Image: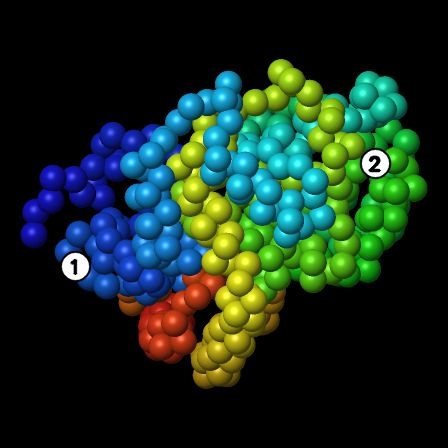
Amino acid sequence: MSHAVTRATFDEVMFPNYSPAGFIPVRGKGSRIWDQDGREFIDLAGGIAVNALGHCHPELVEALTEQAGKLWHVSNVFTNEPVLKLASRLVELTFADRAFFCNSGAEANEAAFKLARKYAADHVGAHKNEIIACTNAFHGRTLFTVTVGGQPKYTEGFAPVPAGVSHVPFNDIEALKNAISERTCAVVIEPIQGEGGVMPADKAYLEAARALCDEHGALLVFDEVQTGVGRSGALFAYMHYGVVPDILSSAKALGGGFPIGAILTTDKIAKSFGVGTHGSTYGGNPLASAVALRALEVLSRPEVLAGVESRRQQLVKGITELNDRYGLFSEIRGMGLLLGCVLKPAYAGRARDFLKAAEAEQLMVLVAGGDVVRLAPSLVIEPADIEAALLRFAAAMERFANA
C-alpha cells in the first residue's frame, strides 16, 4: 500500500531530534492503535503516561467536540468558564488554593521554579535563590528545566546554563541535609523518578525533605507531571506518601492527550505571581480546559482509581511469570501503572533493543534510560487487553533473548 507520507518522510522534512518507530499510527481506540497498513498494536506506552483514558475515550471526545462548537481561544486578557471550572475542581480535590495553567509539563515546571524564586525574593531577599534537585531527574526541555533535571546529557552543548542549581542523590537524606541552607529557595523532587528509571521515593525521604524545607524556609516542589492524575493509583502521588508539597506541577494525564499543564499552590505563595509576572498565551484555553475537566472528572472517580491497582497486579503478575521463563529482568518496580522492568546486567544498555522487539510483535512500550523498559498504559485498560499484551510481551522477550 502506498501512502502520501511515510516514515521516510520524517527523515526528509523533520528535525532529527527524534527517532520515531518504523510505523505511523493513524487511528486509536481504547488501548489499541492501527497503523497506515491496518496493523493493530496494543499500547502499553500511553503516549508517555499521557493517554490515561486510552485513545479517543468517548467522554473526552464529547467534551472536545462540544467545546469546539462554542469557543476555542480568547487569551488571558479574558477568562473563560472551562478554566474556572477546572481550577475550582483541582482546588477542591487537592491541598491547593490556586491554579495556574500552561501547555506542557516543561512549562509547568518552569513556572514552578520561577515562582519559588520569586516567593523567596519577595519574603526574604534575592540572595535566597538556590534550587536543590536530584540527580537523574527529569523536569522538561527548557534551558531552566534541563538544568534542574540534573542529567548532563540534556545540557551538553547548551551552556551557559542558569546558575544557582545543585543536585543530590535521589532518596539520600544525608546528602539533602548537607546541601540545604538558608540560601535554598526550593527543593524539587519527583515522587517517582520517571525518565530516571521509574524509581519511587522512600516515604522517609519525602518526610525528611518536608521537614528540612520547613526548617530552612524553603519551598518543597513536587514534579507530578508523570505521576499525577491517577497514574499512581491515587489522584496525585503525594497522597500515597502523606507528604504535602508547597507547589505541585501537573501535565500529561491532566489533559488525557490534549496539551495542558498546571501548577498548584497555596494562596500565600500564589500571591508572588502578581499581574504581569508570568503568563502563557494559550495557557488555560477553553478547549484544553474543557477536555482536562472531563478527564479529571473520570480519573478522580473512586472506581477508576481502585481499578489501577487491580490492573497493576495483573500486569506485574504476568510479567513476573514470563520473567521466570526468560530471566531478562532483575526487578519490576514503580507504583500504580507506572512500571519499570529493569534489565539484568547481562542485558545492560539494551532497553531500546527490547522496544524494537516489542514493535516487531505489535506492542508499544517505552524505555527509561538504557536499562529499564517502562510501561505506562491506560489506567482503564481492559483486563483482556492486558492478557493479550502479555502474549505479545512474551514474544518480544523471546525475540530479544534470541537476538
Q: Residue at x 11, y 44 (%)?
A: 3
Amino acid bearing label 2: Ala
Q: Choose top left, top right, bottom left or bottom right for residue 387.
A: bottom left
Q: Is residue 355 visible?
A: no
Q: Secondary structure at mark 2?
A: loop
Dot 1 crowding, Cα within 10 Å, few <14, some 14–19, many 20+ = few
Locate residue 282, reporting x and y percent: 45, 27
| For residue 327, above or below residue 93 | below
- Please count the marks in the image: 2
Q: What's the colour scheme? A: rainbow
Q: Is residue 304 visible?
A: yes
The residue beneath circle 2 is 218
Q: Earlier in the sequence, mark 2 or mark 1?
A: 1
Locate residue 324, reporting x and y percent: 50, 83
Amino acid bearing label 1: Gly
Locate residue 120, reporting x and y percent: 81, 26
- The dot on residue 38 is 1
Q: Residue at x 51, y 80 (%)?
A: 317
The Cα–Cα distance between marks 2 and 1, rounded to whole angstroms, is 54 Å
Q: Nearer the viewer, residue 161 or 389?
A: 389
Q: Is residue 125 left or right of residue 139?
A: right
| For residue 161, above or below residue 6 | above
Q: Nearer the viewer, residue 213 or 17?
A: 213
Q: Secondary structure at mark 1?
A: loop
Q: Is residue 401 left or right of residue 195?
A: left
Q: Residue at x 71, y 31 (%)?
A: 270
Locate residue 95, reporting x and y percent: 71, 48
